[in-house]
Amino acid sequence: MNSELFQKLAKAQTDEERSWIVTESLLATLSPELAAAAWAAVVPHWFNAEILAALRPELQAQSSQLYTKLQALSFVEEFADRGHDVHDLTRNLMLKHLWQEHQDEFITLSQRAAEYFGRNNQQPETQIEWLYHLIVVDREWKGSEFWNLAQNWDNSFRVAELESLIAALLEQIAAERVETLAKAEVYYWAGKAKFRVYKAKEALERYEEALAFYRNIGVSEAPPVEARLGEANTLQAIGDVLQFLDRRTEALERYEEALAFYRDIGDRLGEANTLRAIGDVLQFLDRRTEALERYEEALAFYRDIGARLGEANTLQAIGDVLQFLKRSTEALERYEEALAFYRDIGDRLGEANTLRAIGDVLQFLDRRTEALERYEEALAFYRDIGARLGEANTLKAIGDVLQFLKRSTEALERYEEALAFYRDIGARLGEANTLRAIGDVLQFLDRRTEALERYEEALAFYRDIGDRLGEANTLRAIGDVLQFLKRSTEALERYEEALAFYRDIGDRLGEANTLRAIGDVLQFLKRSTEALERYEEALAFYRDIGDRLGEANTLQAIGILQDDLTVGLEYCQAALELYRQIGTKYSQSRNLIYFTSTILLKLERQTEAIDALNRAIELAKEIPYQYFVEDALAKLKKIQSSDSNI
């Protein structure tokens, strides 16, 4: 090491300065041609003889020899399947000095690199490299090439390629080689890439950075349409993330800001998309009439401009509202319309979502075998396209159907699969709902201590995210377990907590179910008068909202409490008739075994009791549910035994 170099190193203040002194010293020992090749080699992420010839056309004849000589340098290494590259530390130092001291040469080399990779951009890595250089040399950035590629990869769920593209462009932004509009667009897509994999907080940070860049364009100059459109798009995207994070009031504010921009610049598609997004928030906030109005506005726009995907998405959203409003036949019609659109335009995610929604309606209409078929179709689509949240939601929905069909072990398997997905992607509401569903299955399987643990986990999630309905439902479920475990005082406390929530949020069905559950506890505690009062309250609610199953269950509970057996039998038979009309074989069989036949025996109407038990066995076999079959047979055996002892 010569004395001059030693002195420079001694004076250096940072590791970066020292590294550059060593690199600069090495470059000074190279021939002019080899040094020129070395400076060219750092501009792309990798190089070979052909790339060197493109970047240094004046050295084209020597490119192969120079490429060979470069490989012997200490800062050059092999780049798998593509040639060689310069070590990151050395490359970054050389790029920094080239940009700061010879910017014209940097631009020239980048221009040549953009042209070279633009001619050879059939593979993702070369497409990324092309845009990596283009973003520097295109000083009047319109971004169409970048936008088209990012959109294509986003639509195709090619997340890894999209993230690699963003990372490459962020290198140029970090080095301050990029115009403001280009920075804004890259950060916008960085937000989209993060949100695609459910990293919502990181997505929000990227979007906020993009928004600041878009707004900064307007500080120094009249904002071009691209900037205002970008601001509107970013506001809408921020609204989407806030909606995902359950910060819906903030989401609504951002959507309204975006809507004003779209209307001002005459972007009807943006206006339609934002109206639909506002509808989504309003629907979640239980302002469904307003949501329906916004959706219908959006639908008219989509139809007018021929945006079939938007039309399909909005038809699906309208179906969601109609289903919530118990207008299931209308909902099914809208979903089927949407499904036809999705299939026609090849939108597999839309098709999957709509199949799942149709499954939800069919389940509500007690057409569960059909619902299961639609869910399985949807699940196959979600798995094929890698939509993990959709897969999780559908697994949970399948679990719900299987549990209703008393296929509890299968239901538990599906719920556990769904839970793993929700945890992995950070969907806390999905995790809470699935924990509660698992609790329901465990309770049904008489594994109540485990059920209680799952319910308590779910309750903590609901409280943390502020989901009051979820909290109320879980409190009631915990009450059910505590009551079964003979911890009736604790059960009563949980039910009363749940009742207060249901009343506060106006959930009349939840209120009715909880009143009936409180009645069950009071009955167990021999406080029959109070129990009857609660049952009568619940019955009035069920009849008012048209819940026939709730009505039947409550009639049965009232019948059991009657001192007059004949009156009690009338209540139980009224419940049985409702169960028959609804088509629930489980409830019919249970009624006949444990209530109707018991009262008939007390009334000494033995033949009718035997008929009731035989009918219960037939129903239990049809379900099938062996536990009921065994109980009914045991009861028949007891009757026969009593007869033989007379």
Image: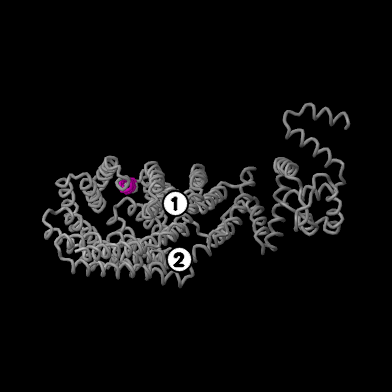
Residue shown at 67%/64% (left/top)?
122
Query: Residue 571 location, x and y as percent?
Result: 16, 60
Across and down, in percent, residue 256 comes to 37, 50
How far separated are the C-alphas under marks 1 and 2?
A: 33 Å
Q: Is residue 334 visible?
A: no
Q: Could you tell me which quadrant the N terminus lies in?
A: top right
The residue at the point 62 percent across, 49 percent down is 167
Binning the other alpha carbons within 10 Å of mark 1 as few (below 14), some (14 to 19) or many (20 upward) gives: many
Q: Secondary structure at mark 2?
A: helix
Q: Hey, what amino acid is under mark 1?
A: Ala
In this view, 212 is above or below 127: above
Q: Is residue 16 left or right of residue 177?
A: right
Percent position of residue 441, x then y = 39, 55
Which residue shows up at 17% across the image and 54% down it? 558
Residue 488 appears at what percent x and percent y? 27, 43
Question: Which of 520 and 277 lies nearest the eye of the viewer?
Answer: 520
- What label does residue 232 carry, if any? 1
The quadrant of the image that shows the C terminus is bottom left
In the depicted view, which residue is nearer to us: 80 or 459? 459
- The reply, left or right, for residue 549 in relation to residue 189 is left
Q: Which span is picked out in magenta?
A: 471-481
Whether 568 is among the magenta residues is no
Callout 2: few (<14), some (14-19), or many (20+) C-alpha neighbours within 10 Å?
many
Q: Nearer the viewer, mark 1 or mark 2?
A: 2
201 and 239: which is toward the camera = 201
Q: Name the residue beneath numbered marker 2.
A: 378
Name which quarter of the figure residue 527 lies in: top left
- Helix, strand or loop for the magenta stretch, by majority: helix
Residue 478 lies in the magenta-colored region: yes
Sequence-wise, the earlier of marks 1 and 2 is 1
Q: Is residue 508 visible?
A: yes
